[in-house]
Amino acid sequence: MNYSVWSLLRGALSGHRHWLPAWRTPTPKRTYDVLIVGGGGHGLATAYYLAKNHGISNVAVIERGWIGGGNTGRNTTIVRSNYLYPQSARLYDFSLKLYEGLSRALNFNIMLSQRGLVALAHSRHDLDSMSRWVNAMQMNGIAAELLTREQVGTLAPALDMSLQARFPVLGGLAQRRAGTARHDAVAWGYARAASALGVDIIQNCEVTGFVKRADGRVLGLDTSGGRILADRVGIAAAGHSSVLAKLAGFRLPVTSYALQAMVTEPIKPLLDTVILSPGAGAYVSQSDKGEMVIGAGLDLFPSYAQRGSFAVTQGVLAATLALFPSFGRLRLLRQWAGIVDVVHDSSPIIGPTPVPGLYINCGWGTGGFKAIPVGGWTLAHVLATGANHELAEPFQLQRFITGRFVDEAAASGIAH
């Protein structure tokens, strides 16, 4: 893995005794208690919580590429819990609470910055929707407030606040506890902490098949490094969950889409909160390095291309410049896309699969990064105990038979 001078310097200055983001290079064993497919944030968090919460450290994380090289390193770093439905609110707010103590728990600076998030209202309809949204959040025990036009302008003076703007700002919703965290630091922190507890992290190892007993129960994995056996197997491989499910012999109600992001050249501090515009289809924050980090909605056609379509790139840049005209002078440095799994009701799946001994954490859509701690916590719980965690109970695959959906498709801002 390549480390930038910046990331190493920030680690050195963070005050940790062992600041280098490194872990043991294990000699893989042939038998483990648990195998986890996917070395991104959710897979690494699962391994860590298996060891930390349940005392199960005979665990291996199998990663086809390198640690944190997938969606974990390709997102826009935003953490929040401004969801509408009670089931989602409990899940994501538990995750945000874990984020708030994660640097201390992992002894690694994840650079959490709770700078707040403001969702913009551009019409009377938006204001009505946000009023309902704020009320729902407050009823779910999550602090939120409705902002006036003047309050939004004070929080983000670079916005075009004129009444003739392409997207006139009439008000907004604020979650003060939301913010950003360093995406690769989250992966490194979980990896290092899990490794210190005895977990094996095996990179550049591709899963080629599932080993099963005659009755269909999973016994392990066939990989490019050989066969590895285990009592239980968990899948946490964002973007490729349906591919692995097919390999295991079942189908998921999941479609993979590209989700784009981009950054500008760094400038002096200008934006100290996260601005999200559901109407414009864009969201913006400023990184600690000074870059403007711009995110878009999904490319709404199935894809595994980690670049996204030019049409969406063009649209989100036009929307961003309409919101912040002064950004038109900035140069765009990088543009990329992560591949996200979107479940048909736009909520995750956490729990057992139709294949005995095989469990899955998938379908977070655009919510994957903010859900890393809770995704790992709940998947570790079911892998260790065989019973679903209460937070994950509403998000079982069985809901597509019973029809008890948690439809967050339009309830979480720019989510899907």
Image: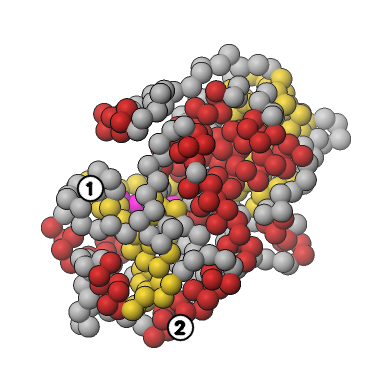
Give the residue pinned by disc 2.
128
Determine if the magenta segment contains residue 259: yes
Q: Quadrant of residue 226?
A: top right
- Left or right, 285 with reference to 178: left
Report the residue that reaches farthest toward the top: 27
Look at the image and give the residue range highlighted in magenta.
Answer: 258-262
Q: Who comes first in sequence, dot 1 or dot 2?
A: 2
Q: Is residue 92 visible?
A: yes
Q: Quadrant of residue 38?
A: top right
Looking at numbered disc 2 in the image, what kind of residue is underneath it?
Answer: Asp
Task: Tell me the element at label 1.
Answer: loop
Q: Is residue 240 magenta?
A: no
CB of mark 1 within 8 Å of CB of mark 2?
no
Percent across and percent down for residue 328 are: 16, 61
Q: Between residue 378 and residue 365, name the one nearer to us.
A: 378
Looking at the image, residue 246 lies above or below residue 274:
above
Q: Residue at x 37, y 66 (%)?
A: 118
Disc 1/disc 2 C-alpha distance (Å): 34 Å
- 139 vs 287, left or right, is right
Q: Position of residue 154 (x, y in %)?
A: 25, 70
User: On the rendered structure, is 242 left or right of 398?
Assistant: left
Specify the amino acid type for callout 1.
Gly
Q: Up-down: is 67 above or below 262?
A: above
Q: Which residue is mark 1?
A: 290
For mark 2, does the 10 Å Cα neighbourhood hold few (<14), some (14 to 19), or many (20 or more) residues? few
Instruction: Give 96 or 16, whichever is nearer the viewer.
Output: 16
